[in-house]
Amino acid sequence: MLTQMGLPFRSVVSHVSEEDPSGDPAEISRLLAEKKALQVYAKNKESWILGADTVVAIDHHLLGKPENRDHARQMLTLLNGKEHKVITGICILTPAGKVAHSEAVTTRVRFIRLTRQQIEDYILTGEPYGKAGSYAIQGIGSFMVERISGSYTNVVGLPLCALIKALMTVGALKRFPLS
């Protein structure tokens, strides 16, 4: 997504545990983004750092990425015919390692009523793996989404409008679009 926006970046994987935290989903995603950014900064000093973490929340459940086929089926069944929230925490660190910006962006997503066969066929595509909530709105999974309220790019992976605004506010970007 950052590439399509013309933003130069280097991707660095963090190794922050995302195992079943409890509490407010927005606060959890924001804090996980902050932890990821700080961990990456420890080995990449003197650069602006962006940390991000996305969770799917429904009925007091936090849905991360599915571990296997049964887990994907469980998540998709839980989301079936209901509204849920996609929440992405973002954290921007200055080149000095200070938190310049930290927030969570929430988008509401409503699924259509799916048949068991549709859920099974979608899992067989392989697309649910590696995706919070076991679906990709930008892919085959778009057929399940009846409507959204909020940032589409948040559901894809990064709330780009909020991110660009934050990068400009903290001085990581002087102008946008880049020319």
Image (spheres, grey):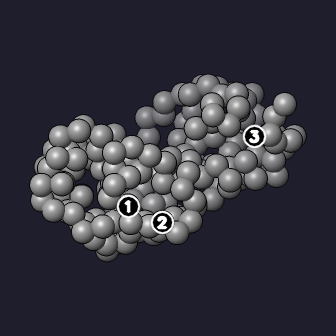
Amino acid identity at mark 2: Ile
Q: Residues within 10 Å of mark 2 (few under 14, many from 20)?
A: some
Mark 2: which secondary structure?
A: strand
Taking the spot 57% from the left edge, 32% from the top edge, the residue there is 40
Q: Are marks 2 and 1 in contact (CB under 8 Å)?
A: yes
Q: Which residue is mark 1?
A: 145
Decide which of 22, 61 is in the foreground and name it. 61
Taking the spot 60% from the left edge, 52% from the top edge, the residue there is 159
Q: Residue 6, percent across and down? A: 70, 32
Q: Which residue is mark 2?
A: 148
Query: Which image quadrant: the C terminus?
Result: top right
In the drawing, does residue 79 fall left or right of residue 90? left
Taking the spot 22% from the left edge, 47% from the top edge, the residue there is 122
Amino acid identity at mark 3: Thr
How far apart in space, not on screen, are marks 3 and 1 (Cα)?
A: 37 Å
Question: Mark 3 or mark 1: which is in front?
Answer: 1
First of labels 3, 1 by sequence position: 3
Decide which of 24, 174 is in the foreground and name it. 174
Query: For residue 94, which numbered disc appears in the image?
Result: 3
First of labels 3, 2 by sequence position: 3
Taking the spot 56% from the left edge, 51% from the top edge, the residue there is 153
Q: Residue 146, percent across and down? A: 38, 66
In the drawing, does residue 120 fall left or right of residue 36? left
